[in-house]
Image (cartoon, grey):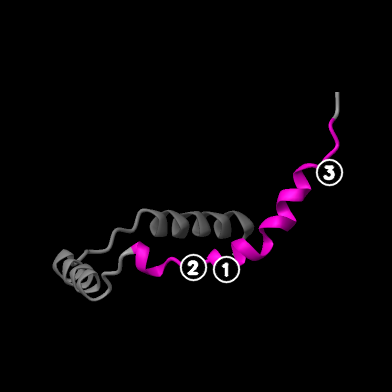
Amino acid sequence: MGRGRQKAKATKQARDIKYYSPNTDYAALQRELGASNSHSHHDADDLEPDYSDYEDKYADQFDDDDEDTRQTG
């Protein structure tokens, strides 16, 4: 197969893939999305880690850095 025919075939295949629209089973999609929401309901506040121990430990180290910066101008 020559380059022209090969390129035309590749273009046709790419176009077929790009515009391919399979039949969507919306009922199955709704069941799947509905099932995942009922099983995995978590509040964001429950998952937030507690960093208060680290804040106190390193607070002095980073407060001093502001005074050591060079000022230009």
Q: Amino acid at mark 1?
A: Asp
- Apparent side of residue 17 relative to residue 23 in the rendered image (left or right): right
Residue 31 is situated, as x and y percent measured from the top left of the image, at 16, 71
Q: Which residues are magenta?
A: 44-71
Instruction: Give the CA distance from mark 2 to mark 1.
Output: 8 Å
Q: Residue 42's spot in the image, x, y percent?
A: 30, 69
Earlier residue among tags 2 and 3: 2
- Residue pictured at 57% horizontal, 60% vertical: 6
User: Left of 2 or right of it: where is 41?
Assistant: left
Residue receiving disc 1: 53
Specify the farthest residue to the top.
73
Q: What is the chief secondary structure element of the magenta stretch? A: helix
Quadrant housing residue 34: bottom left
Find disc 2 in the rendering and name its residue.
50
First reached walking from the N terminus: tag 1 or tag 3? 1
Q: Which mark is residue 72?
A: none
Q: Are marks 2 and 3 in contact (CB under 8 Å)?
A: no
What residue do we see at 33% from left, 58% from top? 20
Kindly indicate whether the residue at mark 1 contacts the one at mark 2 (C-beta within 8 angstroms): yes
Residue at image position (86%, 37%) is 70
Q: Is residue 2 above or below residue 67?
A: below
